[in-house]
Amino acid sequence: MSSPRRRTTGFVLAGLLVALLVAGVGSWYASSSPDGLESAAEQHGFAETARDSAVADSPLADYGVAGVSDGRLSGGLAGVTGVLVVLALAGGLTLVLRRRTAPAPETPDSLPAGQG
């Protein structure tokens, strides 16, 4: 019989694999049509007033990887990179929070005089 830790590790690895597959392969089938806000802006004639965001020149801007000319590959790589970044941030946060020690329980000897 497998240990609970081993089952948890298997579950986490399976979840990671599914997330990477959805991000990497699923993005190949994403629509190239504009999203709802862009579509509404085009329909109502104010799309030309849009400005780029402050991070428009970032390596993962616009759901793609800068320097990769194939749109599908670029989107897949951006998705996989996003999953790995979130995993690293969540894992780091988990490690930091796990290292905090719980406060010692108060005993009658540790309470101020007259409160125990």
Image (spheres, grey):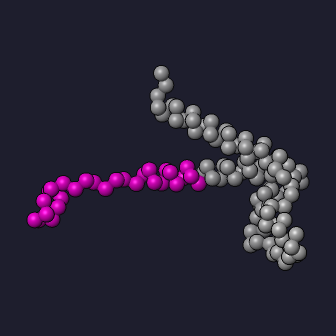
Q: Nearer the viewer, residue 4 or 26?
A: 26
Is 69 or 21 nearer to us in this picture?
21
Inspect this view and state whether residue 57 appears. Answer: no
Residue extending farthest to the top is 1
Quarter-wise, where is residue 22 in the image? top right
| Residue at figure coordinates x 81%, y 75% from the top left | 51
Which percent across, then down, holds residue 81?
71, 51
Q: Which image quadrant: the C terminus?
A: bottom left
Q: Is residue 101 magenta?
A: yes
* Residue 82 x %, y %: 69, 53
Indicate left or right for 87 with 108 as reference.
right
How many numbered discs? 0
User: Bounds of the magenta span?
Assistant: 89-116
Residue in the picture at 51% in, 31% down: 6
Outermost residue toward the bottom in this view = 49
Q: Eyeballing the image, is 113 above or below 77?
A: below
Judged left or right of residue 111, residue 57 is right
Please say whether residue 18 is visible from this viewpoint. Answer: yes
In the picture, measured across the screen, residue 55 lies left or right of residue 34, that is left
Instruction: Determine the residue positioned at 62% across, 36% down.
Output: 14
Side (left or right) of 20 relative to 7:
right
Residue extending furthest toward the left: 114
Residue at image x 15%, y 56%? Answer: 108
Q: Give the x, y percent position of residue 72.
A: 85, 49
Q: Which percent across, then down, holds residue 45?
A: 88, 75
Viewer-proximal residue among 20 and 50: 50
Q: Is residue 74 magenta?
A: no
Question: For this rendering, which residue is in front, 31 or 86?
Answer: 31
